[in-house]
Image (cartoon, rainbow, N blue to C red):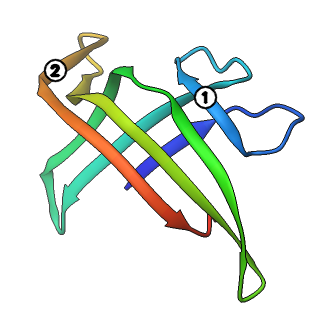
Amino acid sequence: MIMISPVNGPSSLEGTYVYSKTGDIGTYDLKFVHATDGEDELLWYTNGEKGEVLSIQSMGERAGQKIYRIILSDFDLNYGYWDYLAGKWVSLGQKAFRLSYEGPIE
């Protein structure tokens, strides 16, 4: 599951956002959760390191539903898990991620 969290404030969703974990208006954060069905030990999360500009454009409507184009040219996923006993993030490596999507946003 990919969770992209743009902070648009009082303005519309369309626009560009810079990567930041601050939650400030005009920024976005991205998380990715991966699990193999029934295999909790293979569950891993990402903790973003850095990312390019996220672009969200309105593409009109299709069948009465708003359609958007989302483009993220590059994002570094630092995957691993949170060690609750030690109170720190344990990195298992990094992966490059790119996204281009056109469709509804729910």
**Residue density around tag 2, few if under 14, some if 14–19, many if 20 or more, within 10 Å:** some
| Residue at the outermost front position | 59
Q: Residue 37 at what x, y percent from top left?
A: 18, 68
Q: Are marks 2 and 1 in contact (CB under 8 Å)?
A: no
Instruction: Give the image location of residue 46, x and y in percent.
Output: 29, 33
Which amino acid, by three-letter code, is at mark 1? Tyr
Q: Secondary structure at mark 2?
A: strand
**Picture residue at 65% right of the left edge, 51% below the top:** 57
Q: Nearer the viewer, residue 75 or 44?
A: 75
Residue at disc 1, secondary structure: strand
Residue 43 image point, x, y percent:
19, 48
What's under tag 2, amino acid-wise? Ser
What residue did someone put label 2 on? 91
- Mark 1 highlights which residue? 17
Mark 1 or mark 2, which is nearer the start of the sequence? 1
Q: Quadrant of the N terminus?
A: bottom left
Which percent across, then down, holds residue 101? 45, 60
Select label 2 or label 1 by which is in front.
1
- Label 1: few (<14), some (14–19) or many (≥20) C-alpha neighbours in 10 Å: many
In screen coordinates, is 17 left or right of 54?
A: right
Q: Residue furthest bottom?
A: 63
Give residue 88's quadrant in the image.
top left
- Left or right side of 64 for 28: left
Residue 10 horizontal side relative to residue 16, left or right:
right
